[in-house]
Image (tube, helix red, strand yellow):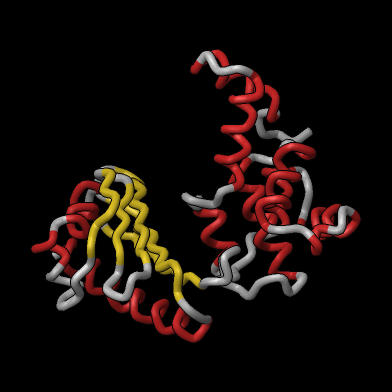
Amino acid sequence: MTKQKSFKTRIRERMEKTGESYTTARMYLIEQATDGSAPSDSQVIAVAGQRISDEALARRTERAWDEWFKLLDEWDATSKKHPDIARWLVEEHEVDGWWAQTITVGYEQSRGMRQPGQSPDGKFSANASKTVNVSAERAFDAFAEESRRAEWLPDVPINPTTVNRPKSFRAEWVDGTRVAVWITPKGDDKTSVSLQHEKLADSDTAAEMKAYWRDRLNDFKKVVEG
């Protein structure tokens, strides 16, 4: 049993909240935990190839990396697909959904099942982040408002697809790839901006876009703080 709420407890809580049957609530939570559609900070770090520490993982899941890897090897996880591994961690070991994703990605990388930055569909992602000394609303508007965005991201037509002010922003890039941004307030005038460029063709493109976004976010910081 981990320090997270048990899986059965979360099922019961959802049943009370929604009136769903046990089976329906259970399936919803499993799908939410294993589809990988909205990565947390821990998942982003793992996908970027910068594995979190044993101490942090053990604190949240009560096992360090080697312990999880041994369990997964005994289960023959190298023969399983990504959603199946994450689902097994959720159902059999009651690991919180995003930590199940983190463990799954770390395991797949360690066993050569995917390269750092590679997603389950074989595509790659590039990640970048920046802390700025402005409110979350001001940081968000510099992404979502076209005129403000042009000040630090010029000559790049993008198509916003999901705008959730002031928390997240998703858009289609000019080549059909995707950009996802998460805005996290750290105080009244301090905000963390995390960006992930998804669906990139290969690791070389991911490395190029990582460098590109580091430069762009440096300009972003100058604009919003200026």
Report x, y in % for residue 42. 56, 54
Task: Residue at 52% x, 60% y: name it.
Answer: 44
Q: Hey, which quadrant is residue 20 in on the image?
A: top right
Residue 10 visible in this rendered orientation of the protein: no
Q: Is residue 14 above or below residue 181?
A: above
Q: Hey, which quadrant is residue 94 in on the image?
A: top right
Q: Decide which of 62, 84 is in the foreground and name it.
A: 84
Report x, y in % for residue 218. 28, 73
Q: Is residue 180 left or right of residue 51?
A: left
Residue 7 visible in this rendered orientation of the protein: yes
Q: Quadrant of the N terminus?
A: top right
Q: Quadrant of the C terminus?
A: bottom left
Report x, y in % for residue 216. 28, 75
Q: Is residue 199 above or below residue 75?
A: below
Q: Decide which of 98, 188 is in the foreground and name it.
A: 98
Q: Is residue 91 left or right of residue 184?
A: right
Q: How many marks?
A: 0
Task: Residue at 23% x, 52% y: name it.
Answer: 140
Q: Residue furthest left?
A: 147
Q: Is residue 138 left or right of residue 72?
A: left
Report x, y in % for residue 31. 58, 40
Q: Hey, which quadrant is residue 67 in on the image?
A: bottom right
Task: Residue at 23% x, 48% y: name it.
Answer: 135
Q: Residue furthest right?
A: 74
Q: Is residue 124 above or below residue 30?
A: below
